[in-house]
Image (tube, rainbow, N blue to C red):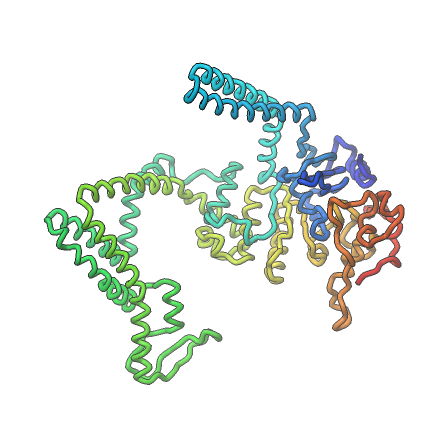
Amino acid sequence: MATALGMWLIQRTGGEGVSENLLEIRGLKVHFDTLDGPVEALNSVDLDVKRKQVMGLVGESGCGKSVTSLVTIGLATCEVDEGSVKYEGEELVFQEPESTKRIKRISSSIVVISVLMSIFGFFWMILINPLHGMDLFLGSLLVSAAAWGGGFYYSSDSRKHERFMRWVRGNEISMIFQEPMTALNPLYSVEKQISEVMREHNRLVEPETPMMNRIGQALVSPFTLFYRTIEAKPKSTTLIISILAFVVAAHRLGFAESAKPLSLAFIAVFPIYYLITFGTSGEDIGGAEKAMLGPMEGELSAGVTMDRINPISGTKESEYVSMPGIFVNSLWKGTIYSMPGVFVGGAVSLVVYLMLWMPFSSLMGLAVVCTLLALPVIIYLDFLRLDPAHSRQVSEILEDVRIPNPAEVVKMYPHELSGGMRQRVMIGMMMSCEPKLLIADEPTTALDVTIQAQILKLMRDLRDEMETSILLITHDLGVIAGMCDEVTVMYAGRVVERASVDELFANPLHAYTRGLIACTPNIESTRKSILPAIPGQVANPSDFVNGCRFCQRMERTGETVTIRPEMIEHSAGHWVEACPICLDADEDKWE
C-alpha cells in the first residue's frame, strides 16, 4: 500500500505512467531470511531522485540506507515483499510469481534426489548387479536432466531481468561502495580494473594495435622479455647465464661429479658480488637493507665531515665524524650491502649442486618441461596487456578526477595508493561509463577532512559537468548541508522526514531529525560543553514495533508504539511522519 508521501510523489510527476524523475522508489518493503525467521529491513520506503539533483539519505547505522541502495541496483540478498523501484520508468525489482517459485523449488529437489540416486546406481552397477545398476544410473540421470531443463525454462524471465540489470549497472547507475581501502581488487592494477568495467559496457575506444599485430607481439614476447631483462639488469643476467653455461659444460665435458664442491663457492661469491654491484654502482637495494643502512647521503671519505639527511626535519646537515667513526660506518655499510648475498649465495649453491648431481638428460628434460609450461603463460599475459589507446583512455579518466601523474598511477596497484587516491580511482571507475545516476554510499569514510573536501568538490564538479544525479548516503550532516539539494531522513527502515536542505535545517519537525542536528558539533557551542546525544539505540529489526519506532527507542508506551503515524505534508515539499510526541519539541530529551 502506497503511503501519503508516495501518492504525493506520483501525483507530482504526473501519474504512475509518466515520470520526470530519474529514480522512483515507492512503498518498498523488504526482509532478510535468518535462522530465527524473517527480519524486516525496509518498511514502505518512498524516495525519488530528480535529474541533476543531489539527494541526501541520512540516518544512523542500521536504518536501511545501504539496503535501499543495494535493492536499487539489484545486489541485495534480501527478499522484496512489496513496492517498486523504477529507473526512467523501467522496473528494477523482479518479483517471480509464487507458482513459478514453487515449480523451481520442486525442480531443484528432484535434481538433488536424482543425482544422489545416480551415484547409488553407479556403485550398484560396479559392485553388485551391472544391469540393474546401469538402469538406475541412466534413469536417474535422465530424470535429473529433465528436472533441470524444466527449472531452466521457468527461469527465463529472471535471466532476462538479470541481463537488463547488468546493462543498467555501470551504464546507467553506478555505485561507490563504502571503505575505499577495500573496494579495489589488490591483485590488479588500476588500468586493468577500470578498463574491465569499460570493456564490459563497450566503452573502450578502437584499439591502436591491429589484432594480428597483437598476436605477433605476443608470440615473440618471450624473446622480448629476455632481451629487456638483459638490458635492464646486465650484471645479474650475465652471472646467471655464466652459471648455467658452467653447469652445461661440466656435464658435456664430464667433470660434473668433481665440480660439485665448487658449488659451495657461490656462498662467498654472491656477497662479494652484492658489495661490488650495489656498494659502488649506486644500484638500488631492497627496502629492508636500505632501512638498516640508514638515511645516509654521499660517500664516506677520509675527511672529517659528511652529509646526512635529518630523518625528522628532512634537511641536509653536515656532521663531524672521526676516523674511527668513518671506519665503523664503512664496515657497517659493507656488511649491510653484502648481507643479502649470503642468503642468495646459499640458495644458488644448493641449486647448482642439484643441477650437477642430476643426469644431463633429466636436467634437459626438466628444462624443456618448465619452458613448455612457462611459454604459454608469458604469451597469454602479453596478449592480455592493455592496448596503448585503452591505457591513454584510462589515464584521461584519472585526469578527469584530478589525479596527478595519471600515466604513472594507471600502472600502480591499490596498496601503492593513499585512501584519497583510491577513492578518486573508485569515482573514476564509476564515472567511466558516464552514468546518469551515481549512488555514493559514504564516499568519505576513513578519509581525513582535507581529502573529504576534495572528494566532495570532485563530486559536485562531476554533477555540474556531466549532469549526473547523485544519491548521497552519509552519517555526516555537514556533508549533507554542503552537498545536497534535498534530504531524506531514515530511521529503523522508514522515511521519517523529507525536505529541501534549507528547510530541513531551518525547521526540523521530527524528533529524530532534531536529535541528529543537536548532536552535530557547533562552532558556536560553549567551550567544554557536553555534546548532546540521543539516548538509547536503534532496536533490533526483529523487535520493531508497528507504531513510531523512535518512540520505541525512547521507551514510550501507548498508541504511539502500536499505530503507525501517517506521513503528512507540513508545508510545500516538507513531509514528516506525524507522531504527535515526536513533533513536540518540548518532549525532546537528549543526554
Q: Is residue 348 above or below residue 150?
A: below
Residue visible at 75% across and 37% down?
26
Quadrant position of the N terminus in the picture: top right
* Percent of width and height locating residue 327: 29, 79
Please identify the quarter of the rendering in which residue 362 is found.
top left
Where residue 306 appears, x then y in whole percent?
35, 80
Q: Residue at x 71, y 46 (%)?
A: 64
Q: Nearer the viewer, residue 388 or 227?
A: 227
What is the quadrant of the C terminus in the image?
A: bottom right
Specify whether 200 is left or right of 177: left
User: Compared with residue 81, is residue 59 higher up or lower down, i.e. above or below?
Assistant: below
Residue 370 versus residue 124: which sits nearer the camera? 124
Residue 395 at least partly seen: no
Q: Nearer the viewer, residue 133 or 90?
A: 133
Is 7 on the left-hand or right-hand side of 125? right
The answer to whether 315 is drawn above or below residue 505 in the figure is below
Is residue 562 visible to us here? yes
Q: Residue, x 55% and y 57% (percent of image)?
A: 419
Image side of residue 52 versus residue 259, left or right: right
Residue 239 at x, y = what percent? 22, 56
Give the image location of residue 492, x and y in percent. 75, 47
In the rendered image of this protein, does residue 14 appear above or below residue 585?
above
The number of numbered discs placed on residues in the rendered structure image is 0
Please state if 194 lies on the left or on the right of 555 as rendered: left
Residue that protrudes farthest toward the left in the picture: 253
